[in-house]
Amino acid sequence: MMFDDEDKTRSALHKIVDTPVPPATTTAEQVIRSGRRRMLLQRGGAVAAAVATLTVIGIGATAFGGPSDVSPAGTSTTPPPPPPSTASVITPPTDLPTEFPDENQPPPPGWTRMPATDHDGPKCESPLPGPGPHLALPERSEVEDLVLGTLRELTGEEEVTLFESSWDTDADKPNGPIGRLTAEVPADDNSESVRVEVSSFAGTPVQAADGDIHRHSNCVGPARRVLEDGTVLQLYPPLAALADQPFQDVHAYLPSGRMYQVFAWGGSETGQPWGTGKLPLTPVQLAELVQRLATDIG
Amino acid sequence: MRARDQEFTEFFAARFDGARRIAFAMCGSWADAEEIAQTAFVRIYPRWPKIRTGTVDAYLRTVLTRAFLDTRRRRNIREQVFAEVPERSVPPDHSSHDRLAMQAALMSVPPRQRAVLVLRFVADLSVEQVAETLGCSTGTVKSQTARGLATLRAHVDSTPTRSN
């Protein structure tokens, strides 16, 4: 019988591929381009991948909204005027959104959905951030401990680990000091990631948040809440630039000029090369994490 | 980045057609096979510096097989590939009938068992290597192999032989 021993089976099944292979249309260059895009997304730079203007602006200066005194040649370093603010909601930080954001649903109590209309043309693009105060960074260990502790508490996963952490304290760099850390959360046989960036911004919290409304250039407005001390939280709708690695981020703009950005996505550097198809944190948890950073560390 | 891309380009040139053949055996379509292979190489690129030379082929097999098995995800990724890959016909040769019959029989096997059969008998991997590729035990590989071959045998037995 054909499949009664391994050699016969192997010989029979090999016939399937014993045929001329049609020429491939895929090139290495195409794969590398897509691979780079995937790499950006995995590193929390979905914004960078999503915003077409970044190729002109420069990822380092703008991808995470940090302040910059570097402008493209021939342009002014003066920050563009912020659009008029449309939200000023002051509520206690207890009723965080549960299902936000769904474009067709009203935002939860305490949150205001920002308009998706573009103040600066039809492209729904955020203006370039202006130079910020280049604030000194908070204590690295303090941020790491808070992030890991909060993630363990919120997800119930004790095995949350710190994947990488870099604290660039050089105030003379164009973007000013930037601290970054990435934590990984176990998820079945894979991992998901949460990245935190701390930097500073120009202008008032509302001005900075207004300037970042169209961070993802998708004409979908984020949700915003303003805390009693004037800190602005801005939660963006999830992105699915890669189907198996959804992405969502939230920003906190503090009155001091400090800015926290938290990015969550359904993939990791140390887990499987594919994503989990879900986010490690709910919108509630994502907002809770950035709010703790803003209020507990400042 | 330049050295990394150079190395990756060489890896791509050496392995892409082989990956397409394995994917074709699994899915039965050259267009889908190319898409699966694309997906696998795109997923490998970000991790390229971390993949050791000795394990890169095993890694490619794992990613490729996973890309094939996750058909729902494959449909989603289809929307993001850089170009439509047209189905191309291959000129028939004297062995076409046997090959097509064998391919039809293999397509009757459930996907995971089919992946096991392809890895064992087309990619010529050992039971242990297939287990490593699929992230399962050797016992599972053996049982999936037996069940896959039984399905294959049943399909062949039920297909009328060609009259010459």
Image: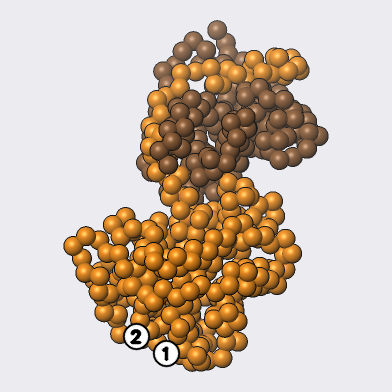
Chain colours: A orange, B brown
Which labelled disc corresponds to residue A85?
2
Q: Residue at x 74, y 28 (%)?
A: B127
Q: Which residue is mark 1?
A: A88
**Residue farthest left in this picture:** A74
Image coords of residue B36 (percent x, y): 51, 38
Mark 1 vs mark 2: same chain? yes
**Image quadrant assignment for residue A13:** top right
CA neighbours of label 1 inside 10 A, class few (<14), some (14 to 19), many (20+) = some
Can residue A172 be seen by looking at this rendering? yes
Question: Is residue A41 positioned above or below A33 on the image?
Answer: below
CA neighbours of label 2 inside 10 A, class few (<14), some (14 to 19), many (20+) = few
The amino acid on which the numbered mark 1 sits, given as a three-letter code, is Ser
Image coords of residue A109 (percent x, y): 53, 87
Question: Which quadrant does the C terminus of chain B fall into?
Answer: top right
Numbered disc 2: secondary structure: loop
Question: Which quadrant does the N terminus of chain B fall into?
Answer: top left
Image coords of residue B141 (percent x, y): 75, 33
Which labelled disc corresponds to residue B74?
none
User: Are circles 1 and 2 on residues that touch, CB within 8 Å?
Assistant: yes
Q: CA distance from mark 1 to mark 2?
A: 8 Å
Image coords of residue A265 (percent x, y): 55, 60
Nearer-the-camera pick, A2 or A26: A26
Q: Residue at x 58, y 13 (%)?
A: B162
**Image quadrant assignment for residue B90:** top left
**Residue farthest right in this picture:** B139
Question: Is residue A16 positioned above or below A270 on the image?
Answer: above
Q: Residue at x 49, y 18 (%)?
A: A19
